[in-house]
């Protein structure tokens, strides 16, 4: 016990080294208490060492902020603290005041630490969400960081109560009155306040230690990802500097020459394409409706697909495709002047950073043509709704080809490729572009209406739309299938087969999406084929919802066959057709509802499918968000055939517009679950493994 004088910067206690055996009262100067994440300054009258545990190493550093004098006392247990106070009766109110001041500083420090920990977590999550897009922007190859999905947000210690922080802050705010009218009333009051402050400080210190461990673990677990992000942000900064007038990051020169040389097209085709593009570039009104402009755009399209086909075939045996050619395959890029420097750099980085969909459902047109060429999928239907075998049979019947040629072409990769390019590629490219009369397949900066990084569709974005819409209409891609296994006593079982569609990204800057075909051939258990621009300039979420609504309609027509509009065989299409055809006589519709329907039918030229798609958009986007847009009849039909997912049903269960519909749905599902439950119980009793189809269907009915 005695006075100790400290110079500025002198360490009183060092964390992890010194052992706690004393506490100090500051009689002059100030002490900084710190760890690697925070620090607080204690003034004259403060007791140093309160959060420490006697006999253990110090957890905080104690350093003199200025010339400081402290009085030390032995510290073997918390019962030593009242002895220190009672040995200094004259300054007991000051000790009490400073203890509360220290507790208030600890509260503020802890809240700051928690905010910083939350900010660190939020930054990692935000970076992880933006990581795919940033990779594309800077041309970095996307890597997987599964550990990011395992981290959790920081949580406040259960020992920390908001009321205790408010209480401490209130004591601090009324310090002057307490010193004058409360602490001075007696020694026991001072001891009680100091020991209360001691308890709070210990609780806060324990919570702070847990928070520190969390931050260290978070940093260690995410070190690989954060290092990668530093590199990406550095490259992004370089890219932005180059756009502001610095040295160019990407240099693409004579891209068209590179593409034509790679494609190995004939000199005549190459010269023709070069001349057409030169004329196109030099015309500032290249999208007007004059006959000359239209003819030029048609000629460019013809040359484009010829070059594309030739370059595609060359790429099949090339493991080192030039970046300009990749940009050509993915985006229709042919000329750096036509695209503009900024767009050229962006496209270059996107092509460099591109990673295919691991699930193989979201594909660029190049990847799709590879599937066709390699006989992994059959060619798509043509504009006359003929699949490839039907087209060949028609050609044989008309005498255009012989039976031997038909048999040869059926599995000939080049014939299949030619058919797909002529139909899906060339027609779909025009369709997704949105402005059919002014379509041109080459990338042109004049068509860029939104920043490319915002409109760029990646597999991650597309799957995100899938997940979003499935969180509302969970059965959107389900088809009815039949399972039979007489060996286990299940002769016939209908189940729902969930089959995600192919989404094919077309190399243009466009505004439309379309359902090309709902199934492959006549096989109802094959994925649908949907098409959309790789750079979509419209609201992509709404575009996707409309696509899925169109799929709902067309798939129902396919499943129902000739009865698709027969109301005696209830289905989505038949009920909707009946509702729209006879809405004027429907007593359940108000006069306002009927007037709106009359307007909608006029707007969509009496096309029932388009009216349904518009209602489906309102159903998924607004009705699911408890914002009514539909009338009672439309809502009932949609909920019957496109029911909301379980989480959403539970959320809106109290909504009177849906209560009865949900009750009917629950009854219907319970009736479907009962026979399944009986089958599962029987199989369990007989020790027969439950087939995956049965367990999956049982779980599906719980969604």
Image: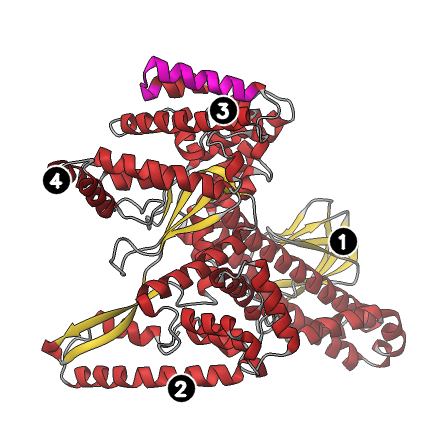
Q: How far apart are marks 2 and 4 (CA)?
A: 56 Å
Query: Which image quadrant is residue 665 in?
Result: bottom left
The first of marks 2 and 4 along the sequence is: 4
Residue at mark 2? 667
The numbered mark at residue 30 is: 1
Task: Kindly state the secondary structure of the residue where label 1 is placed.
Answer: loop
2 or 3: mark nearer the eye: 3
Looking at the image, which is closer to me, 370 or 116? 370
Q: Is residue 300 magenta?
A: no
Measure how far apart labels 1 and 3 are at the Cα level.
Answer: 83 Å
Helix or strand or loop: what does disc 4 sit on?
helix
**Residue picked out by circle 4:** 403
Residue 67, horizontal then vertical, whole percent: 77, 47
Q: Name the residue under label 3.
A: 296
Residue 237 seen in render: no
Q: Nearer the viewer, mark 2 or mark 4?
A: 4
Q: Distance between the residues labelled 3 and 4?
A: 39 Å
Residue at image point 55% right, 79% down: 585
Identify the image's colour scheme: rainbow, by chain, secondary structure or one colour: secondary structure
For the N terminus, which image quadrant? bottom right
Q: Which of marks 1 and 3 is in front?
A: 3
Instruction: Report x, y in % for residue 582.
Output: 51, 75
- Residue 617 pos. (x, y %): 53, 62
| Magenta-colored span | 262-281
């Amino acid at each position: 016990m005695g006075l100790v004088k400290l110079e500025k910067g002198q360490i009183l206690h060092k964390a992890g080294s010194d052992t706690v055996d004393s506490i100090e009262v500051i009689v002059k100067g100030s002490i900084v208490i710190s760890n690697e994440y925070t620090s607080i300054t204690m003034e004259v009258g403060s007791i140093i060492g309160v959060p420490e545990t006697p006999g253990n190493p110090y957890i905080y550093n104690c350093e003199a902020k200025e010339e400081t004098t402290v009085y030390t006392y032995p510290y073997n247990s918390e019962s030593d603290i009242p002895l220190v106070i009672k040995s200094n009766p004259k300054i007991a109110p000051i000790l009490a005041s400073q203890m509360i001041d220290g507790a208030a500083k600890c509260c503020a420090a802890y809240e700051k630490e928690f905010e910083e920990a939350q900010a660190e977590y939020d930054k990692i999550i935000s970076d992880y969400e933006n990581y795919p897009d940033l990779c594309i922007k800077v041309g970095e190859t996307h890597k997987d960081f599964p550990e990011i999905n395992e981290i959790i947000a920081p949580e406040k210690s259960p020992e920390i109560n908001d009321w205790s922080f408010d209480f401490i802050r209130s004591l601090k705010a009324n310090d002057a009155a307490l010193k004058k009218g409360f602490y001075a009333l007696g020694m026991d009051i001072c001891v009680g306040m100091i020991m209360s402050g001691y308890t709070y400080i210990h609780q806060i210190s324990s919570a702070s230690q847990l928070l520190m461990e969390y931050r260290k673990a978070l940093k260690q677990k995410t070190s690989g990802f954060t290092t990668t992000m530093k590199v990406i942000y550095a490259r992004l900064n370089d890219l932005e500097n180059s756009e502001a007038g610095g040295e160019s990051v990407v240099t693409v020169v004579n891209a068209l020459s590179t593409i034509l040389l790679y494609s190995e097209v004939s000199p005549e085709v190459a010269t023709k394409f070069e001349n057409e593009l030169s004329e196109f570039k030099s015309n500032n009104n290249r999208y007007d409706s004059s006959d000359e402009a239209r003819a030029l755009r048609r000629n460019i399209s013809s040359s484009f697909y010829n070059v594309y086909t030739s370059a595609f075939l060359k790429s099949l045996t090339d493991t080192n495709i030039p970046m300009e050619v990749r940009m050509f395959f993915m985006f229709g890029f042919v000329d750096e002047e036509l695209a503009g420097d900024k767009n050229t750099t962006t496209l270059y980085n996107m092509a460099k950073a591109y990673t295919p969909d691991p699930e193989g459902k979201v594909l660029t047109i190049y990847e799709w043509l590879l599937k066709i060429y390699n006989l992994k999928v059959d060619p798509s239907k043509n504009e006359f709704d003929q699949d490839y075998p039907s087209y060949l049979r028609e050609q044989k019947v008309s005498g255009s080809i012989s039976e031997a040629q038909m048999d040869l072409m059926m599995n000939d990769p080049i014939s299949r490729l030619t058919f797909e390019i002529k139909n899906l590629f060339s027609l779909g490219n025009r369709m997704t572009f949105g402005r059919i009369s002014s379509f041109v397949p080459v990338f042109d900066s004049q068509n860029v209406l939104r920043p490319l990084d915002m409109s760029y569709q990646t597999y991650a974005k597309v799957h995100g739309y899938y997940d979003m819409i499935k969180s509302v209409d969970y059965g959107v891609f389900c088809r009815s299938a039949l399972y039979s296994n007489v060996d286990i006593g299940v002769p016939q079982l209908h189940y729902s087969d969930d089959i995600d569609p192919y989404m094919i990204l077309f190399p243009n800057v466009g505004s439309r999406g379309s359902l090309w075909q709902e199934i492959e051939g006549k096989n109802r258990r094959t994925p649908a084929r949907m098409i959309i621009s790789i750079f979509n300039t419209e609201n992509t979420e709404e575009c996707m919802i409309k696509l899925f609504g169109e799929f709902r309609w067309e798939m129902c027509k396919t499943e129902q066959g000739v009865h698709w509009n027969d109301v005696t065989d209830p289905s989505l299409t038949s009920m909707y057709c009946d509702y729209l055809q006879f809405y004027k006589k429907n007593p359940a519709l108000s006069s306002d509802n009927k007037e709106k329907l009359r307007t909608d039918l006029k707007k969509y030229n009496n096309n029932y499918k388009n009216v349904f798609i518009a209602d489906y958009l309102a159903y998924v986007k607004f009705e699911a968000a408890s914002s009514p847009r539909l009338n009672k009849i439309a809502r009932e039909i949609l909920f019957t055939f496109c029911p909301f997912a379980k989480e959403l049903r539970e959320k809106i269960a109290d909504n009177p517009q849906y209560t009865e519909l949900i009750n009917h749905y629950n009854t219907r599902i319970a009736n479907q679950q009962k026979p399944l439950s009986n089958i599962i119980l029987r199989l369990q009793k007989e020790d027969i493994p439950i087939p995956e189809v049965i367990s999956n269907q049982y779980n599906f009915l719980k969604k």
